[in-house]
Amino acid sequence: MQQFTPSLPTIQFATFLSPVLYKIYEYIAEYVGEQVGSSVTLRTGQSLEEFAHGTADIGFLCGLQYVRMKNHHACPVELLAAPVLEGQRYQHRPIYYSDIIVQQESRYTSFEELQNCTWAYNELASHSGYNLVCYSLLKRAKTPHYFGKMLATGSHLQSLQAVLDGKADASAIDSHLLDVLRQERPEMAARIRIIDSFGPSTIPPLVVASRLNEDSKHHIRNALLSMHEDLHTAKELHKGRIERLVVVYDKDYNDIRAMLKQVQQTSLQDIG
């Protein structure tokens, strides 16, 4: 890729997604830095306001967080790209699922059997862990009160651990995270069973702070879109179960936007 003079000596990446995916995000950040001639940092994001305040330039973000940010008049971010995951179920498209998991030896065999169970969820701000679950319940003419108890855990990984520890009967987990866990921690993945899947939904995107100049955005996007073309880089993407990165548009997130609207109209988003 042709070098250009970067407007930022350091590009600040932030991830608002599962730490299970941190290594692949770290590799993507380093690759972008090498391609555009900037140093990079990656840290766990604490607040979406970091994009407006200048402490985050590029973020790995839940689709629901993106949709909520776009509801504000002065949204500080723009879509940059999104991953296409490996596997037939993803149809070479930037989509993912919410997989309903239980312990391997659990008596539950379907979502319809989970009435009055203890349900673990990561956080209200999650699409795959909460919003999509509320929407799926709504489509079944039910609310989260369908579950006997709801346990807020703080992350997908902690929800999964709650199921493994017997503190919860079931949970909804990001399918990308589960794909990586099967590869990196097969002993953990072997202890759970998927009894249903919700989706597909448009996958969590990479976003860029709107304040960056257009030349920088262009070169960063091009670096992301060409990652899979290099054999070594493609192998690294494979470790994160990513086939390639593609352009996504705001309209692509209308699926999440529509689900959120229906959930909010029935006040389910506040039930926890």
Image (cartoon, rainbow, N blue to C red):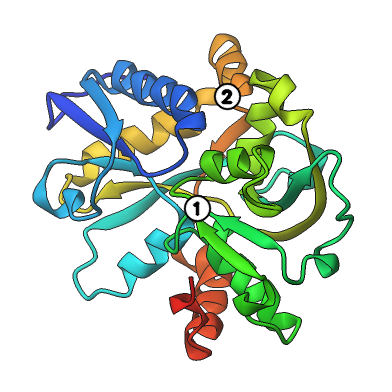
Q: Is residue 59 above or below residue 196?
A: above
Residue 84 appears in the picture as rendered: no
Q: Nearer the viewer, residue 150 or 218?
A: 150
Q: Which residue occupies 51% across, 24% down? A: 227
Crowding around mark 1 (Cα neighbors within 10 Å: few <14, some 14 to 19, many 20+) is many
Q: Specify the amino acid type for callout 1.
A: Asn
Tell me, for residue 19, which label it has, or none: none
Q: Nearer the viewer, residue 63 or 116?
A: 116
Q: Earlier in the sequence, mark 1 or mark 2?
A: 1
8 to the left or right of 135: left
Tell me, for residue 122, which label it has, or none: 1
Quadrant (top left, top right, bottom left, bottom right) of the N terminus: top left
Label tally: 2
156 to the left or right of 224: right
Tell me, for residue 228, which label it has, or none: 2
> Looking at the rendering, which quadrant does residue 58 occupy?
top left
Q: Which residue occupies 60% across, 43% down? A: 162
Q: Position of residue 151 (x, y in %)?
A: 53, 58
Q: Specify the amino acid type for callout 2.
A: His
> Looking at the rendering, which quadrant does residue 52 occupy?
bottom left
